[in-house]
Image (cartoon, rainbow, N blue to C red):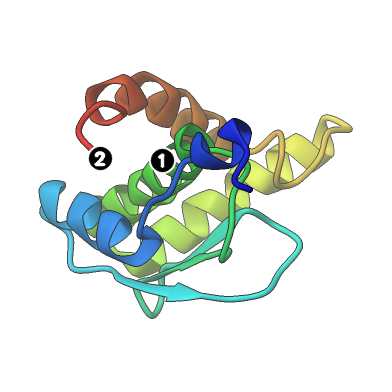
Amino acid sequence: MIKLKDLLLERIDYLDTAEYLVKQYKLKSKIKFSRGSTKADYDWMKDIIYLRTSYSSVKDFLITVLHEIDHAKDAYRMGKRKYEDEYQKAGDLAVHQGKDFHDDNAFEEKAEKWAKKEVNKWIKKV
């Protein structure tokens, strides 16, 4: 017997959706899946967005992909080397202020803010 709550689970093809979003922002980043402790990572040297195989909700997945897209946009705009240098400087500044290199990095905060704003544009389309 199928329970109603089982029918209400959200289903989405993560690969197709992430590739679609990347194209919508005129990027050429590749999407790959990996096992890691973070929700996602962007490798700016290889231009690859690494995602988990599951997320708690579609909205959480979309915010995560959009967050990594913002990093990719910065790397495209600035160039890989400059992006790496500026990201490192922002992380070092956070550490110098007694904060976390990653979580308090200005690039991470900017990407998260942008993703949370952008998600409303995509939530009904996927």
Rendered image quadrant of residue 35? bottom right
Q: Check the image and report above or below for 14 versus 6.
A: below
Q: Earlier in the sequence, mark 2 or mark 1?
A: 1
Which residue is located at x 61 percent, y 33 percent?
5
Where disc 2 sits, the SS reads: loop
Give the residue displayed 46% in from the left and 33% down from the top: 59
What amino acid is labelled 2 in the image? Answer: Val
Residue toward you, 75 or 54 = 54
Say which element carries label 1. Answer: helix
Question: CA gap, disc 2 to disc 1?
Answer: 9 Å
Spot the residue most to the right: 98
In front: mark 2 or mark 1?
A: 2
Query: In which quadrant is the C terminus drawn?
Result: top left
Q: Residues within 10 Å of mark 1 (few under 14, many from 20)?
A: many
Residue 62: mark in rendering: 1
Marks 2/1 in contact by CB < 8 Å: the verdict is yes
| Numbered mark located on residue 126 in the image | 2
**Residue closer to the observer: 63 or 75:** 63
Left or right of residue 92: residue 5? left
Circle on res. 94: none
Residue 110 location in percent, x, y? 47, 30
Rendering quarter of residue 72: bottom left
Q: Which residue: 82% across, 30% down?
A: 97
Q: Residue at x 47, y 41 (%)?
A: 10
Eyeballing the image, is 77 above or below 125?
A: below
Check disc 2: other Cα within 10 Å, few if <14, some if 14-19, many if 20+: few
Q: Quadrant of residue 52?
A: bottom right
| Amino acid marked by disc 1 | Leu
